[in-house]
Amino acid sequence: MHAEREKIRVNIHEGITPEGKEYGEQFTYSEISEEIYRASAKPSIWYFLGLGICVALVLAGVGTVAYLVMVGMGAAGFTPPIFWIHFIVNFVFWVGIAHSGTLISAVLHLFRSKWRRGIFRVAEAMTVFAVMTAGLFPLIHIGRQWYFYFLVPYPNQRELWVNFKSALMWDFVAVLTYFTVSLMFFYVGMIPDLATFREKAKGIRRTIYSILSLGWKGTDKEWRHYNRSYMFFAAFATPLVVSVHSVVSLDFASGVIPGWQSTIFPPYFVAGAIFSGMAMVVTIITPLRKLMKLEKFVTDWHYDHMGKIILVTGLIVTYSYAVEFALAIFSGNKYEYDQFIYRATGDYAWAFWLMVFCNCVVPLFMISKKVRTNVWLMFVLSIFVNIGMWFERFNIIIISLSHDFLPYAFGTYLPRWPELLITFAAFAWFFMWFLLFAKFFPVISIAETKELVPKPLRERGEH
Amino acid sequence: MKKVLLGKFTYLDDAEKVIDELLKVGYSKKDISFISPFPVEHIIEKLGGSDSPVKYSVFTGGVLGFASAIALVLITSLAYILPVGGKPVVAWIPYVIVMFELTVLLGSIFNLLGLIAFCRLPDIVLFIGWRPFLPSLTDDKFGITVSTDRVDEVKAIFERNGAEEIREYS
């Protein structure tokens, strides 16, 4: 076991294996195609168990939404003053989760980072599924889902037009763009790998991969257009990383509620999004690499880099918390001051301190190289970060709404079962899509990993 | 009548030598196609440069997105006057978000369309197996296809440089 671990260990600074090979050098081309195809083709019993649990929870969630439609949103805990309840907490959390996928695939691609190659496909899939999850919550939250199309600007008999000065419309446009661009980026990146799968699969799977790969052959002309197109996608997606969560933060910052109206929100939210997204990548990829035997492809070298990003963004988030408090204390705004004192000492102090522990203390463990390269310890720490980031959104939304200007309007809140069930169902929805993706699609980029393998040259007499 | 010859190679330098020889004996870059499981930059460069007309389609999409965003926000603001938050009826600063997002959205959509169009995808003929292609070319081999009426000459070049398999398509 120890020997096996040593075999897959890659030097964390240079990406060098103990045998002196660079990451990628230890593979052959057909080994890469074969192992990644095998990982997708033969799931274990644990896979089906996990998928079954996810599907059951999703069905329960669908039933609960139907119940809310029948009896009204009051059953979900819609009580003054906390009308945004868990649903908007979940929306912001999942949009945040979506962020690191684009960071890894686009930003690190532009920087020609090598280590992204082992994990970027998983991160991109995570982005797409996280946005699909996030998008559910505004829909559920409006209560009358059949009026959702009111958000779409089109000439209509009501002679009404949407208000593009509203943060709600910015959100709609930003999230829609983010989802569409992420989906296209994800799909385009997969086309050459789907062609590899096409040649390995048989029967109906082959037909499906043939259609999805669009008849990709890998000619020099195709690669020429592909490389350029991929670079444009990366260039477009990079500002989106910054813009989408900035726009989401403006939902709050353009409001007047104490604890919301702050100019620090856009950078604070973007850092938090990357922080939580990267932690979610660790949470997902750790069991995945074990179940699908992908240890060779995702090594402690990758974990080290992911740990560094979590550490840095965690420090930015911690700094942002401190600045929020400093602004509240020194701004002279007594409502703002009162809000932050309430956060730390009031009814929800437990949620605040849980957030501080998970987001400010836990990432500090990652200063240690030993921690960053310990796969299962990273997995545990990433779960703490996920919990902490969910509670960050809980604190911003729930506590601010429960304690605004008038003591008369103050109120506390306890989630009710439909809300909790839908929250858990959302996690199940996300993981269900992820498990289906892992079963049918290449979870690691075949073509990009092959680029790392030394080119076979007759003169060198090797392959 | 021209035929298409496909040669399969294990070694990249063999394939490169074939391309050099073919260019030397007078074949144009258009007649030669190099197939590989991953992009090989220097060969792509040799057979036509790394530039791609996809950029024009991206630019068109971006401009169209930006222009349609301006039209959308202007028309909607003026068609339904909604003075809110002390902002002017046509408030450019909040509209920057919409303009940015639609520029990116349409630029990306046109990027995908450009990619598909310039790569001439979907290649339905490949599905039925008529195109010169072998499964191992998406795995661990390199392929070269040449459109030629001098079959023997091309075959000789392929064989001399270590082709593992040669196929002929009409």
Image (cartoon, coloured by chain):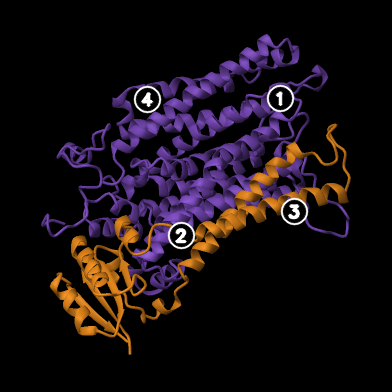
Q: Are marks 3 and 2 on the same chain?
A: no
Chain ID, orange in image: B
Residue B5 horizontal side relative to residue A169, left or right: left
Q: Quadrant of residue A196?
A: bottom left
Tag 1, which chain?
A
Q: Do labels 4 and 3 share a chain?
A: yes
- Indicate the secondary structure of the residue bearing disc 2: loop
Kind of residue at badge 4:
Met
Q: Quadrant of residue A383?
A: top left
- Is residue A85 visible to us here? yes
Residue tagged 1: A261
Q: How far apart are marks 3 and 2 (CA)?
A: 35 Å
Total tally of numbered discs in the picture: 4
Q: Residue sitting at 52 percent across and 40 percent down?
A: A99
Q: Distance between the residues labelled 3 and 1?
A: 27 Å
Q: Nearer the viewer, mark 4 or mark 2?
A: 2
Of marks 1 and 4, which one's residue comes earlier in the chain? Answer: 1
Badge 2 local density, few (<14 within 10 Å), some, or many (20+)? some
Q: Which of marks 3 and 2 is in front?
A: 2
Q: How far apart are marks 1 and 4 (CA)?
A: 32 Å
Kind of residue at badge 2:
Ser
Tag 2, which chain?
B
Using the image, tell me which numbered label, if any, was put on residue B52.
2
For the N terminus of chain A, the quadrant is top left
B20 versus A463 height, above or below: below
Residue tagged 4: A366
Badge 1 local density, few (<14 within 10 Å), some, or many (20+)? some
Residue tagged 3: A152
Q: Are marks 1 and 4 on the same chain?
A: yes
